[in-house]
Image (cartoon, rainbow, N blue to C red):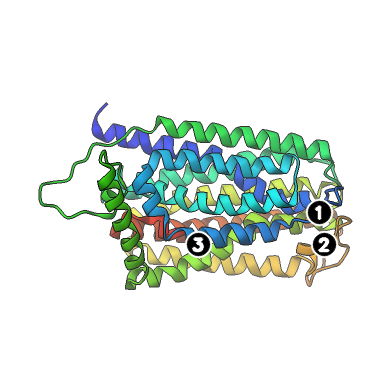
């Protein structure tokens, strides 16, 4: 296999591994609060929203040390260990307890920082300035297809259900745990790239994160990686990109944990309200896959550059969020197990199916916009620095 073919193989395996891993995790996040609301166990006092806050708070702080961890352990081993912690977090829902739920939230926050730093390293060392756009598009398309497969299962498994029983919960989360473990095992198929550094060439962030046979060199690279992370955090480019990543973080939080809960709590959607959680996730995934493909094509053929494409994505976002605001009851995110009968600002359709389809189509419009901004930020970071673990900080 030629070096270029090996690099493309690694990118595809990386994308497929993340597809399996995040089929489980993103589906878990999408239904977590709904499942918790339907728990009959009075000893459990956890909250899906609190868990997400812990995860992304720890995630943010851990990104400062994650390059050092990857420098010592290597990107492949780092992704394997991180995948195991993702699986443990999902497995907690099989028989949830409050202490295990929040403890797992802390560990998965650390694991997420290490996972995405290792992913950024793997993506950049298997790409060059001519292939970074293609490879980034391939990876993100595979990753976002995870929203389609996981939520498709939820849609069919929960059809006609207004309450999630203990048996339903265990079946779903056992399946998701197995899927996440499959993605973790696939990381072992990634092939290591040879070091092509020319004599006298300065160390780059990607080289800092690569494996070293010497324990002393590993420690030196770990320290250098930490210093580089601090330094990059205060560069002009990263400060400007932090605005974009903060926004994409808010969008991710809303659609990965809040919007699905809202749909599942609206009683006027009828007996399909729980299965519509999965359907909304499918439309988000389809929108993001199409967005990644359209962005990749237009960025090559657009003589005005990629900025107009990103601005178009923002306009589409504004329209989608405006419609969601007018169609979703105010108390939907925190509604009790019985759901909410409140009416939003927009008068609902006389038929539950009509109102429901409106709510699941809105997130479809946000997919292309989110992917345009995320992929553009990822490519700009990869073009300047290899340590793209910082990209996820604002999520």
In this rendering, which labeled residue sits more in front, label 2 or label 1? 1
Q: Could you tell me which residue is drawn at 75 percent across and 56 percent down? A: 46
Q: Are marks 2 and 1 in contact (CB under 8 Å)?
A: yes
In this rendering, which labeled residue sits more in front, label 1 or label 3? 3
Front-lying residue, 190 or 42: 42
Label disc, if present, on residue 60 of the rendered structure: 3
The quadrant in which the N terminus is found is top left
Q: Of label 1 and label 3, which has the lower sequence position?
A: 1
* Mark 2 element type: loop
| 226 horizontally vs 54: left or right | left
Q: Could you tell me which residue is drawn at 70 percent across and 54 percent down? A: 360
**Where residue 66 appears, x then y in whole percent?**
42, 54
Front-lying residue, 336 or 73: 73
Q: Of label 3 and label 2, which has the lower sequence position?
A: 3
How many residues crowd around disc 3 within 10 Å: few (fewer than 14), some, or many (20 or more)?
many
Q: Quadrant of residue 309?
A: bottom left
* Mark 1 element type: helix
**Where residue 119 appears, x then y in whole percent?**
41, 46
* Mark 3 element type: helix
Distance from the alpha carbon under mark 3 to that under mark 2: 29 Å
Front-lying residue, 317 or 120: 120
Q: Quadrant of residue 344?
A: bottom right
How many residues crowd around disc 1 within 10 Å: few (fewer than 14), some, or many (20 or more)?
many
**Residue at numbered disc 1:** 37
Residue 354 visible somewhere in the drawing: no
**Where residue 325 appears, x then y in whole percent?**
70, 69
**Residue at numbered disc 2:** 335
Q: Could you tell me which residue is drawn at 74 percent across and 37 percent down? A: 156
């Amino acid at each position: 296999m030629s070096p270029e073919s090996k690099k493309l193989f690694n990118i595809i395996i990386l994308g497929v591994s993340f597809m399996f891993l995040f089929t489980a995790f993103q589906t878990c996040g999408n239904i977590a609060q709904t499942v918790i609301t339907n728990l009959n166990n009075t000893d459990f006092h956890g909250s899906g929203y609190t868990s997400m806050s812990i995860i992304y708070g720890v995630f943010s702080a851990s990104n400062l040390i994650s390059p050092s961890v990857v420098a010592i352990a290597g990107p492949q081993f780092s992704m394997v260990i991180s995948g195991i912690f993702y699986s443990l977090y999902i497995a907690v829902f099989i028989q949830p307890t409050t202490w295990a739920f929040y403890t797992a939230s802390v560990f998965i926050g650390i694991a997420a920082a290490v996972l995405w730093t290792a992913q950024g390293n793997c993506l950049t060392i298997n790409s060059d300035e001519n292939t970074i756009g293609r490879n980034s598009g391939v990876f993100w398309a595979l990753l976002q297809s995870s929203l389609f497969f996981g939520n498709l299962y939820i849609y069919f498994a929960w059809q006609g259900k207004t309450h999630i029983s203990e048996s339903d919960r265990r079946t779903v989360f056992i399946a998701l745990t197995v899927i996440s473990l499959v993605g973790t095992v696939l990381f072992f198929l990634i092939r290591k790239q040879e070091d092509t550094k020319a004599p006298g060439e300065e160390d780059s962030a990607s080289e800092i994160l690569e494996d070293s046979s010497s324990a002393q060199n590993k420690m030196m690279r770990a320290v250098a990686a930490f210093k580089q992370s601090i330094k990059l955090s205060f560069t002009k480019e990263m400060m400007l990109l932090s605005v974009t990543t903060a926004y994409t973080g808010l969008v991710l939080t809303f659609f990965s944990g809040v919007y699905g809960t809202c749909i599942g709590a609206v009683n006027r959607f009828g007996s399909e309200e729980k299965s519509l959680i999965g359907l909304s996730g499918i439309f988000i995934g389809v929108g993001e896959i199409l967005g990644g493909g359209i962005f990749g094509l237009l960025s090559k053929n657009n003589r005005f550059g990629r900025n107009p494409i990103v601005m178009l994505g923002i306009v589409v976002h504004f329209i989608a969020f405006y419609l969601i605001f007018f169609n979703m009851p105010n108390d939907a995110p925190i509604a009790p197990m019985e759901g909410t009968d409140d009416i939003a600002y927009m008068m609902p359709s006389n038929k539950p199916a009509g109102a429901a389809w409106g709510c699941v189509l809105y997130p479809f419009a946000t997919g292309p916009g989110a992917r345009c901004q995320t992929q553009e930020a990822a490519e700009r970071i990869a073009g300047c620095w290899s340590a793209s673990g910082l990209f996820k900080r604002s999520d």
